[in-house]
Image: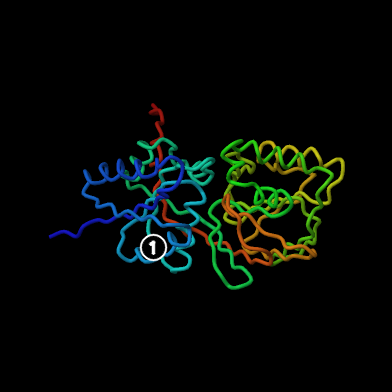
Amino acid sequence: MTNLVRYGIFFNPNSGSGESQDIMERAAERLKEKGIVLVPIAGEDAEDALLKIKESIDSLDALIVIGGDGSLNIAGTAFLQSKKTIPIGVIPGGTINNFARSWGIPLDEDEAIATILGDHTTTAGIGELTDNDGSVKAIISSLLVGRLADISNEVRQSEKRKYGLLVYPYKAIKSIGRQKSHLISFKTDNETLSLKTWIAVVTTNKTVGGHTYLEENRDAFHVTILHNMRLSKWFSYIYFALTGRLNQSRANTFFDTQTLDLINEDTREIAVRIDGDKGPTLPVSLQWCPHYLTLFTPAPKPSHKGNSH
């Protein structure tokens, strides 16, 4: 008698119009045809979902996540806190789906399910954040800190529903001249930089907001900081507010690192934003976790080389 193959499937039944529930049911039918039992995992809130994933890991062969970077963050955090991972598949359902885009995971539902059934995997690095209380949280795609992160954290759900993503650049540009930067220290193994920070973006891959901003993807955090604002840097500020892109230019400071401490040198409380959701306040410590996730991805296409004669 063969053992059953059990995949957990994590989804938020309260998101949107309940579409995640429908996707889960369609995925269950597809996987059942391949002899895979699907175990639904849904929490009343993020903390409940985190607990349920941690309780289920030992009984599962893989975990499927329906959603975007925020949902993937819950799964990654469960893995880090449990000190155990299982292969993870993604059926994108978020607004930007930066992580899925970065790894070539199809945004189309049928193609995403086919990718999981294809059983081809690769490994992906993620970040581990430890806050001042010792709590651990994953960084799947990105961390933001600075004035623009504050603005994003202050946007109400009702405003997001009414105006969509346009609410973020509107509020960012509206704040010009009225909001001050934050004094933050960025400490790596090699140096410490104390900068008046408008926005710092820490990413786990070469894209942010679905846009490529690095030529290659190195095995480390990629840090880009817009700081010490003056007239020559306003274009970079407005460009990021409108596009979500912080290109490497002389207006920015950028570096790669496998460790990073973010220290509040200001008089105000400073909160970070992780994978699209509000995170803890500074100080926090970041540690790079190379090849941490085993990820279902499309199989590479065979190369067709002409025959030589």
Task: Tell me the quadrant of the picture where the C terminus can be found.
Answer: top left
Please name the residue shown 54% across and 67% down the image: 136
Give the side of residue 219 with respect to residue 82, left or right: right
Corner quadrant of residue 211: top right
Give the side of residue 213 with respect to residue 48, left or right: right
Frontmost residue, 79 versus 224: 79
Please name the residue shown 58% across and 73% down the image: 134
> Residue lying furthest left in this view?
1
Give the residue type that dot 1 points to: Lys
Give the side of residue 177 with respect to residue 48, left or right: right
Q: How crowded is mark 1: few (under 14 residues within 10 Å), some or many (20 or more)?
A: some
Q: Position of residue 260 (x, y in %)?
A: 66, 63
The residue that mark 1 highlights is: 52
Please name the residue shown 31% across and 58% down the image: 61
Q: Position of residue 241 (x, y in %)?
A: 70, 40
Task: Tell me the quadrant of the picture where the N terminus can be found.
Answer: bottom left
Give the side of residue 217 with respect to residue 191, left or right: left
Corner quadrant of residue 258: bottom right
Q: Where is residue 160 in the image (x, y as percent from the top left)?
A: 59, 41
> Residue lying furthest front in this view?
158
**Secondary element type, mark 1:** helix
